[in-house]
Amino acid sequence: MKIKGFDGDSATLDAVLEQSPSVAFLIIRRDTILYEKYWDKYTDSSWVASFSMAKSFVSALIGVAIHEGFIKSVDEPITNYIPEIKDTAFRKITIKHLLQMTSGIKFTERYFNPFSDAAKFYYGTNLRKSIEDMKIEYAPGIKFEYKSGNPQLLGLIIERATKKTVTEYLQEKIWQPIGAEFDASWSTDRKKNGLEKTFCCINAAARDYAKFGRLYLKNGNWNGVQVIPESWVNESTTPTLIEGGVNFYKYQWWINRSSYHDFSCDGLLGQRIYVYPEKQIIIVRLGKNDRHQNYFKLFGQLIHLL
């Protein structure tokens, strides 16, 4: 299979992927693995950090918690579950605002700046205290701004609503039903009474990331079992422009070509789970870096060829 590489030259897929430090790449069409390759001593059982792909898993768990009645609706104020901030401007923020990244919270999204909020959340050892210290920058529902503080608040809501850790809820409601081949872990801020870093930090194998993509490809259904409500999958991946919404993002999922209803969960260093429903295709790319290369342009070439 010849494609155009990141440098513009024609090359094989193997050669193109070796132009960046990928560690895993899978192409699945209609439940058949068409391409699977690993690099740098990684194998099909190696854990790879999800980084921000974890945000889409958090969204799925919110949908399940609503279906099970632990959460009433996305229109609930977040202070129903985080009462320690009920007397602040946070009382105007709803769960939907967090899901759509339209909450108006103040949060600096720079991982390589040690003084940024993202770095403090990533390296900190007391996320609950960090959440209490969060501030509001502007009123919710005005505009989209990608801020990792939003899914971190969603993680705390999941814990409070379900009375389970986010890891336990993921294992019970998604990991076991989809028959994950390998265990997953979710990094926490501390060993004892830790809170999952729900803005990032699931560790799992490539095929199991692909299974999560398949779950959304199949509208939340796994071989006849409705794991995630179909209505939630559709709502999560269909953009709306109300309350600050944008046409490229919805409920912690990136919407890539709305005319084809394709979508993805994306993470730092080029981690990707890409879903193209029209041709029943899932592509997973995992790596140590992306060198600012456009993987969605690559995915588009592959979709065209398949």
Image: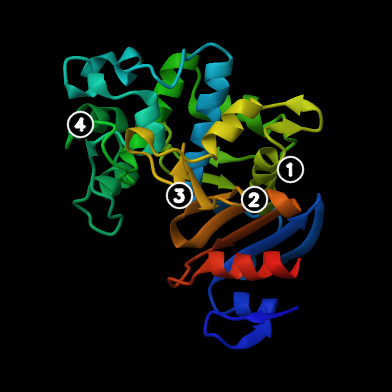
Do we see residue 192 in this rendering? no
Q: Which residue is mark 3?
A: 248
Task: Name the residue tied to disc 1.
Answer: 181
* Residue 169 is at least partly visible in this image: yes
Earlier along the polypeptide chain: callout 2 or callout 4?
Answer: 4
Residue drawn where x is 35% and y is 15% of the image: 81
Q: Mark 3: which amino acid?
A: Phe
Q: Nearer the viewer, residue 129 or 60?
A: 60
Which amino acid lies under the numbered mark 4 shown in the image of this protein? Ala
Upstream in the sequence, badge 3 or badge 1? 1
The colour scheme is rainbow
Q: Secondary structure at mark 2?
A: loop
Q: Secondary structure at mark 1?
A: loop
Q: Which residue is mark 4?
A: 139
Q: Position of residue 82 (x, y in %)?
A: 31, 18
Give the Cα distance between marks 2 and 1: 8 Å
- Which tag is nearer the camera, tag 3 or tag 1? 3
From mark 3 to mark 2, how far is it between C-alphas? 27 Å
Mark 3 against mark 2, which lies toward the viewer? Answer: 3
Q: Residue at x 57, y 23 (%)?
A: 64
Say which amino acid is labelled 2: Ala
Residue at 57%, 49% in the rendered image: 263
